[in-house]
Image: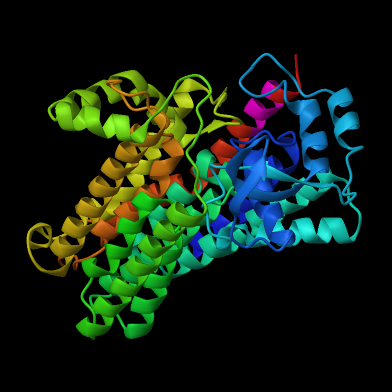
Amino acid sequence: MQRIGPFLFAVLATISAFFLVWSLPPFQTADEPAHIYRANMITHGYWVAAKVQTDGRIAAGGPSDVAIIEAYFPFHHVPFKPDERANLEDFAKSFTARWDGRVFNVAAENTAPYPPFFYLPQAAAIALGKAIDLPVVQTLYLARAANALTCIVVGFFALLLAGRAHLPLFAVLLLPMSVSLYASMSQDGLVITVTALGIAFLARALSEGRPLRSGEVWASAVCFALVGMTKQPYALLCLMPLAVPAERAAVKRLAVAASLAAAVGWAVWMALVVQTPLIRQDAPTDAMGQLRFLLDNPLAVLTIAVKTFQVWGDEYYQQFVGILGWVDTRLPKPYYAAAYLVLLLSFLPLLLGRRAADWYSGAPARASAVTAAVVLATGALLFGALYMVWTPVGQLWVDGVQGRYFLPLAALLPLAFAGGRQDAGAGWSSGVPGVLERGLTWMVWLFPIVSILVVQRTVILRYYLD
């Protein structure tokens, strides 16, 4: 029965992602202009961004085509305004923008430090669009489709390898927020699916009750290194192979050290050579001033943690499941509760199928402890980083954290419960409990059909119908 999941994922993800590829108006996913700039830099030979002169200042970025701005401008009135619609005039104006060779230096401070690896599908599609003289908008759709297809293929193999972790991974990979990232120019879709693939290598060994083979160690280490290079806090994911015993402990230590060195080394390189300070238009920020505030008020950290969830907790709750567009297109409120219920149900076979000893001893307990530590530490670093670089000095809550940042962390959680053997005849193995387990599995597998219908209705109403 487990073998059905990956193929069902491929079908459902293709339907839901490709609907969004074509139905979301151009540039209507969060930061999509900045992401197409980053992918387009690769087509100009800038695999790594640089500091460039633009608008009278030095900024992190690189060369881009003027045509992208011309294609985007007709739709600039839509983001953050739920009452605005994408009309035929917008599309007509946008479709006149073509790749004509005009190039300028663009500032893209939020995407310039990202490595090129997760932009390769989009960059290849842009290069093809230029080669066959597609309009910019059609090239954008092609790039979205290339990204979606790549994410679906990676997600398919992650589920194929995931062992007992397959059901909660299936649920996370088909959340509307996850799927919307597959169907965008963003690298975040591949960040989620490659994280899932790294976890799948570990979960397979843990599910089978054996140590990691050297090939699995290196495969997972490469996955986490690639993810760790995208955002500095994700570098801690490189520690995840420590959660599972390996046939050769020295090989595992070497792989973890190498992946961590790659992630941290990339961050240092970008900080020294590429990055320039993020500019917030509505409020001044100052990382050094923020650091001085925290050193002078160390107990404020607790207040900031509590206040942040008081201010933004509801947003995180919804964003994690899915607020589409520029985080301005909400799904129906009952859907969020249903999605979280299905996520919980996806973990139940793992939670209730463990022996008591698996919670406090052996490889299963070790996997749980390492996973929990990495998830909590990475989450804390995400908040800390945004507090330093995007939050006004002295403010008692953190700005800038998005619910989608936690999707890779959610993909780690199944490993915490994937180990251990079920006691013979005890729960989730035969008879009525087995029937119940199959029922839960089918509920999780079929819930994305509900998601597809809800997302389609929401997108059509938001962008096209008055």
Q: Position of residue 339 (x, y in %)?
A: 43, 35
Residue 137 left/right relative to 421: right
- Rendered location of residue 359, percent (x, y): 11, 57
Residue 183 visible at all? no
Q: Nearer the viewer, residue 455 or 154?
A: 154
Residue at position x 52%, y 60% from top?
155
Name the residue at 16% across, 27% down. 296
Q: Quadrant of the N terminus?
A: bottom left
Give the position of the C terminus as an image quadrant: top right
Q: Quadrant of residue 460?
A: top right
Q: Is residue 256 left or right of residue 150?
A: left
Task: Determine whether 390 is above or below 50 in the image.
Answer: above
- Seen at 33% across and 53% down, the residue is 437
Query: How far across and how far down the image is residue 194, in percent?
Result: 47, 61
The residue lying at 28 percent from left, 63 percent from top is 240
Q: How many marks?
A: 0
Q: Indicate left or right for 220 with 140 as reference.
A: left
Seen from the viewer's position, the closer of residues 434 and 194 is 194
Q: Position of residue 59 (x, y in %)?
A: 58, 42
Q: Quadrant of residue 381?
A: top left
Front in this rendered view, residue 199 or 375: 375
Q: What residue occupies the far front of the structure in this picture?
A: 56
Question: Magenta segment, principal secondary structure?
Answer: helix
Q: Is residue 460 magenta?
A: yes
Q: Which segment is the magenta one?
A: 456-462
